[in-house]
Amino acid sequence: YLAIKDDITEKLKAGERIEFLAHFDQLTGLPNRTLLQDRFQYALHLAQRGGNNLAIMLVDLDHFKYVNDTLGHSIGDQLLIELAKRIKSSLREEDTISRSGGDEFVIILPTASANSAANLAGKLLEIISVPFNIDHHELITTASIGIAIYPDDGNDVEMLYKNADTAMYKAKQAGRNGLRFFTQEMQSNTERNLQLANALRFAIE
């Protein structure tokens, strides 16, 4: 008998680490954009086949930059970690939450109606506003939420995300700490603003 032994524990751990980084956010452990895109496509496919609704929700913290600028990025990171836990605890098993970058979170809600999405958004606004105790600091924060519903607000991933993003910025413009559903009026205003911005570049000429 001839035996050759090689301990591959570290290789396996390294492979698992690479796999994790490829699909999950390193800070919060939530799915990243890559995995979110896959789950979004799958949920959209099921909604199209079953004739069901699908909601996408964008949650963006208000004035998060102030936390980083005054208390440091380590405190800001801890706030994001705790926030992710709060949001995730409020979701169903079939829902997906992702940190898309910075202080923005994306939530996919399969088979969710406008009413159920609004109820969840209201609940999230409440739990986010409960003070966070981080490293002897009591942090009070709020969020702005934008919601788009399939099929009324878009038939593909890109359109639904864009429209939810538009609604989220409308929530911020309305004073923050609130939610907005996407409307066609928002789309018209956005297109008009873009036309004006482009026209102003040549206004003097």
Image (spheres, helix red, strand yellow):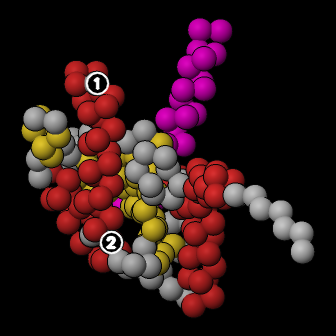
Residue shown at 56% from the left, 76% from the top? 43
- Quadrant of the drawing holding the N terminus: bottom right
User: Looking at the image, which residue is at 29% across and 35% down?
Assistant: 76
Looking at the image, which is closer to me, 185 or 70?
70
Of the residues shown, which amino acid type is indicated by label 2?
A: Leu
Q: Label 1 is placed on what type of residue? A: Gly
Res. 84 image quadrant: bottom left
Q: Is residue 108 magenta?
A: no
What type of secondary structure mainly makes up the magenta span?
Answer: helix
Residue 167 place in picture, x, y as percent: 39, 52
Neighbourhood count class around disc 1 (C-alpha, 10 Å): few under 14, some 14–19, many 20 upward: few
Q: Is residue 112 left or right of residue 69?
A: right
The residue lying at 24 percent from left, 29 percent from top is 67
Q: Which residues are magenta?
A: 181-205
Query: Is the residue 98 above or below the residue 197 in the image?
Result: below
Question: Do we see residue 183 in this rendering?
Answer: no
